[in-house]
Image (spheres, helix red, strand yellow):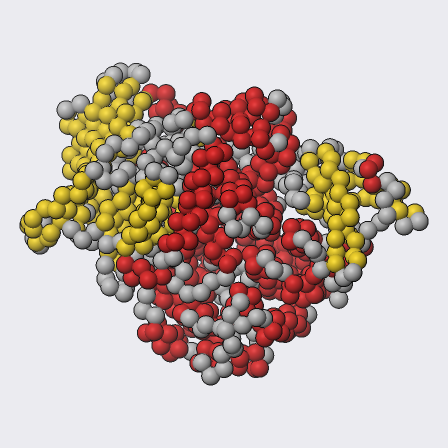
Amino acid sequence: MAGNLTRDEARERARLLKVESYEVALDLTEGDERFESVTTVRFTSTSPGASTFIDLHGAEVRKATLNGEPLDVATYDAEKGRLPLPSLAESNELVVDADCGYMRTGEGLHRFVDPVDQKVYLHSQFETADAHRMYTCFDQPDLKATFQLTVLAPADWEVVSNAAASSAEELPEQAGKHGTLSAARRWEFPPTPVLSTYITALVAGPYHKVTSEHDGIPLGIYCRASLAGHLDADNILEVTRQGFDFFHRVFGVRYPFGKYDQLFVPEFNAGAMENAGCVTFLEDYVFRSRVTDAAVERRAETILHEMAHMWFGDLVTMRWWDDLWLNESFATYMSVLAQAEATRWAGGAWTTFANVEKAWAYRQDQLPSTHPIAADIPDMQAVEVNFDGITYAKGASVLKQLVAYVGLDNFLAGVRDYFAEHSWGNTELKDLLNALERTSGRDLSSWSKEWLETAWVNTLRPGFEVSGGRFTKFEVLQEAPADYPTLRSHRIAIGLYTLADGKLTRTKRVELDVVGARTNVAQLIGEERPDLVLLNDDDLTYAKIRLDENSLRTLVDGGIAVFTESLPRALCWSAAWDMTRDGEMSTRDYVKLVISGVGTVGDLTVLQAVLRQARQAMQQYADPAWRPEGLALLAAKLRSLFDSATPGSDHQLAFLQAFAPVAASEEDLGLLERILDGSSVPEGLTVDTDLRWSLVHALISAGRLTEAAVDAELERDPTATGERSAAQCRAAVPTAEAKAAAWERIVGGKLANHIARTTTGGFQDARHPELLEPFREKYFAEVGRIYRDWTFDQASTFAVGCFPSLLIEPATVQAAHDFLMTAQPPQALRRLILEGADGVSRALRNREKDAASG
């Protein structure tokens, strides 16, 4: 974000002002670096004579007038992004004429040149507070206003904003400000409904577009012209139509923003952004090469997530960023609910949620930076690091628990009341709870305190006694650490699973409330002890689950492979991974579990998550003395699965993608080389562009190819994605010289965000942690400067991506704590450093566990 607005400053401006409208005129024909931005703001003040400020970052202000009187532009602070407004009247009109700068970091108005055809593409990204990089505004969510845009752009461009254009007048060629002749088009957009500044938007350039319509809503899909041949618009539109039908039915309010455009834009910093009627997506969702259905499912969830935001976030918006979860948790929960009830992923949506979203939440919630879902956000720097697994995935998990508590019908009725009461306004947590209390009849104050206002995750264990093969006692034991002692109320199911005829099948299910440290389960007394006891069956609550010794042995001995349902298998994978991360299960036992069961996982998203976790466990948690043996076992299993997979299947591709990064033997690396050069391609496998880059990266990292191979591959694929992949491969060359060169490129600060990220990804190569040893000291020497001088997205990419996380040594933890002690960095950077150090400490503990088990 541009300026570090505080919550107190925002509250004072909201008390003082009511903003009515913005009229913004942009000239995008001025050149490559800057554009003209003229903004007229109309607003009232409750305290005539008072003073305030308006936001505008990094601009050159030519002229500013307030109520017809010129303002002293020398008072404008471009670095802080503030223009003082003295002596307000009751009714005010401010006009600011400025030149603003295009960004290359994915923030504000980002400018990209396509290396394929040299065409220019622009897109805006304003969350949390970067709208004032493009136009002058009061950049906080509770000062909503209408937004009217006029854009002068090159004649061959499409220009898209929140409203549908009312006109696009072609102008004759004319002398430009830089002495060139240019044909242009003036785009006029009508005023929008009232919006928060962070969801206003502009996308411009020679975009390829596909149009359609559904239920009276005009639909548009956009991507770069050079990607048009890869755009699978039919699938995107199908999910879009399913989403609108579902949300119209359950929300009781029609989509409020007229048309609905979805734009896949280059060098986007996140997965997507919910700009009202003008949703932007990471263009990696335009699949250039073959992907598994898991990637298509993930894209569908993102499409539905952003669509849910049209109601949760855009129509009704949080008052301040303390309640960011009101946007993100609800959008996450509703997107999975929509997938489960309205799309072809109905059978697996909650399984994916259990293994992907919840794994993210559990990891985030156990870091030293954990925080309540309803977080305390004193300023904008604090909110930037809270777009995390707690705000999204834990919040959605807790909402799933709330639905189990109040019932889905009551929950959705409360949501409809919430929209009816607060449409076009701003809300706080209490507003939503009040609506849900009215429809459910339940007092949610204690639920809110337990779940939304406290941090960390509980652990649930089965405690039982058996006599004659039957339970004589059964309890659910709940634990919480001393630093976060809250014991919560959980609605859970307990499943008993028995092996019979080669299948692991549920033979008993009970549902109950778990309260306090011990909860007696009388319904299970007298039941025969099964092969597996699964707490939180059906995944109703948010808690870490432990498996008793007999149940774990059932899974490790092959039971994980013979479940008859996908969700309990996914919950067992999740429990085993949690136990491994927490040092209750050795890495080698976890790898044995993966080897015994991964071949039977039909759900591609779960399969790929489990394989990523197994690789992480081997690289970070395994005893170094055993790691080569473990990697060889994992590689042998993956190669066997790849060799036997159905030709042309998603599983064939998934097993190769997992095998390539762990292949180490002469024979295995030779196989990768033969697939890459085409001399031995298995039946059904398409060696397309992205798969080629994956193979090149694996072989570069293993020392089998040189930079000359990267140059040759980039000649085959001279695209933006090719440039990113080449950057990753060059940084992965396993020599001290290549690492030093990559480091200099990273810290130079001149790389576009996506190139910086892929360069960092290649630099941090788990095959060769010894090559990273010289950069631990360099990282802590640079990170403070970089965080101070770079934009947030750039700086956080460096702080997280270059943290010496692969140097799993006490010296890394000590270096982190020494830096925090001496540098006293800003709170947001302190958080990122603490998270990195915690990951190394966890890995050290788990290596000790694994060594002891050997």
Q: Quadrant of residue 115?
A: bottom left
- Is residue 217 visible to us here? yes
User: Residue 743: where, in percent of width, then height?
Assistant: 41, 64
User: Is the C terminus in the top left, top right, bottom left or bottom right quadrant?
Assistant: bottom right
User: Is the N terminus in the top left, top right, bottom left or bottom right quadrant?
Assistant: top left
Looking at the image, residue 726 sits to the left or right of residue 361; the answer is left
Instruction: Please name whichever residue, 513 or 545, is drawn nearer the observer in this view of the structure.
Output: 513
Looking at the image, residue 350 sits to the left or right of residue 309; the answer is right
Does residue 46 sit above or below 4 in this rendering? above
Residue sticking out furthest to the front = 215
**How many dots with numbers?**
0
User: Residue 142: where, in percent of width, then height?
Assistant: 38, 28
Residue found at x 50% / y 61%: 292
Residue found at x 68% / y 51%: 568
Does residue 631 sit above or below 28 in this rendering? below
User: Residue 696: where, in percent of width, then height?
Assistant: 45, 73
Instruction: Please name whichever residue, 405 or 817, is drawn nearer the observer in this view of the structure.
Output: 405
Q: Quadrant of residue 3?
A: top left
Residue found at x 57% / y 23%: 439
- Is residue 82 visible to us here? no
User: Residue 273: where, in percent of width, then height?
Assistant: 39, 44
Q: Quadrant of residue 756?
A: bottom left
Residue sticking out furthest to the bottom = 679
Residue found at x 33% / y 62%: 229
